[in-house]
Amino acid sequence: MPAIAFLECVRCHHRVSAETPQTLCPIDAGSLYVRYDMDALRKTARREHPAELAAASAASLGMWRYADVLPDATPVTLGEGWTPMVKSKRYPGLFVKEEGANPTGTFKARGLGMAVTMAKKYGLRHLAVPSAGNAAGALAAYAAAADIAAHLFMPLDVPLANYLEGIVYGADVTMVDGLISDCARMVGERIAAQKAAGTPVEDVWFDISTLKEPFRVEGKKTMGYELVEQLGWEYPEAVFYPTGGGVGLIGMWKAFEEMEQLGWVSGKRPRMYALQAAGCAPVSRAFDEGAAASRFFDGADTFASGLRVPKPYGDAIILDIVRASGGKAVATDDAGILASILDWAKHEGLFLSPEGAAATAAYDQLLASGDIKAGERVVLFNTGAGLKYTDMTADAMKLKRPGMLPTSLPVGGIITPV
């Protein structure tokens, strides 16, 4: 596992040491990327990657099989990564990367697994996160595994599963009457108050928010390594990614850059499509307007709770990637998302999350418009298990729990006499 050479600001390229925990660039508050000595890695990383990684697969089918390009630390792991690549039976060339197979049922396990691993290495004792739901659940699980205190801030209307996760994993849970942006403000205020009160450094919460620390991207980038390896070390033509905070899309783009530098993949990078819900579509709106960054999306409202991020911190990075790749940002309304959930469940046997269904719905739309050609190799991410959203999806369907079953049933029937 390589030592980190430095952390680099994505905006001004200022370099920061990774010897101590870092949040944002001290100059312009830009997000920090982990950088390695790529010249050294080219000499030491597995050169014959397909054979050697295949040989290593028995030891690790998770994201830590890419230890050559992850920070040097003892993993806090629950078995995250190496999720299935499911081939669609109806759409030639389309694959669904099923991230619901991760621990805690979503892709968030990758980023939080890596972030908690590094927090443990640094000796941090308290981690705090504002979350639309799934990041909170993942932090709670990995913090429990690492014996670190987790402080979760979530909107009141997150899926019940997310609230339940926080409680059963023993986290400190605060439910907020507002959006994830309100949760983020509250986390910042709590940390500022702790510092002002002279709280001992080791007891001050560390903000592990999306793109406000450098290691969630490192965990999420393994999705890029995996999809390329699972496709025989070749790029697909396009990647469809549900985008709330957008860390997965950002991480995959970083992975593509690293793999090219290592000589592990070549050719044209895939077109990147950022998919949102029409009820909260700041990136899609900014893309359509030709803006460099998004505006706060007022009145955010969608049952795809993971997409209810009214102003992503990495919006400018997301837009740069989408445009550089020749892709698009597309939004679908909740009716279209629900219809796609039901369609894929009935015809493909996949119970998608609402976020994943925003991607499948957009795929249908772009296939019809000709933006995507039939037969093009496309990887579409279902970022979470649909079963984590049973209450939200049932509400969207106006489906109510059946009446209570009787507590006892009469004995009898085929086997015994009436």
Image: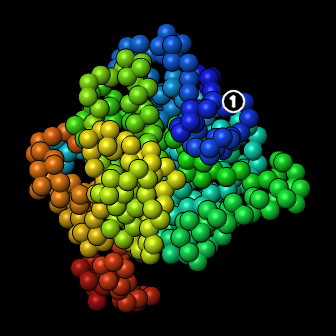
Quarter of the image containing the C terminus? bottom left
Say if 248 sits above or below 33 in the image. below
| Front-most of residues 146 and 255 | 255
Q: Quadrant of residue 402?
A: bottom left
The amino acid at mark 1 is: Ser
- Residue 149 seen from this side: yes
Say if 12 sits above or below 406 in the image. above
Q: Quadrant of residue 117?
A: top right
Quarter of the image containing the N terminus? top right
Colour setting: rainbow
Percent from the top left, x then y, of residue 98? Answer: 34, 49
Percent from the top left, x then y, of residue 268? Answer: 26, 28
Q: Quadrant of residue 320?
A: top left
Disc 1: CA contacts within 10 A as few (<14), some (14-19) or many (>=20)? few
Residue ID at (24%, 58%):
362
Percent from the top left, x then y, of residue 61? Answer: 44, 33
- Disc 1 designates what residue? 17
- Residue 163 seen from this side: no
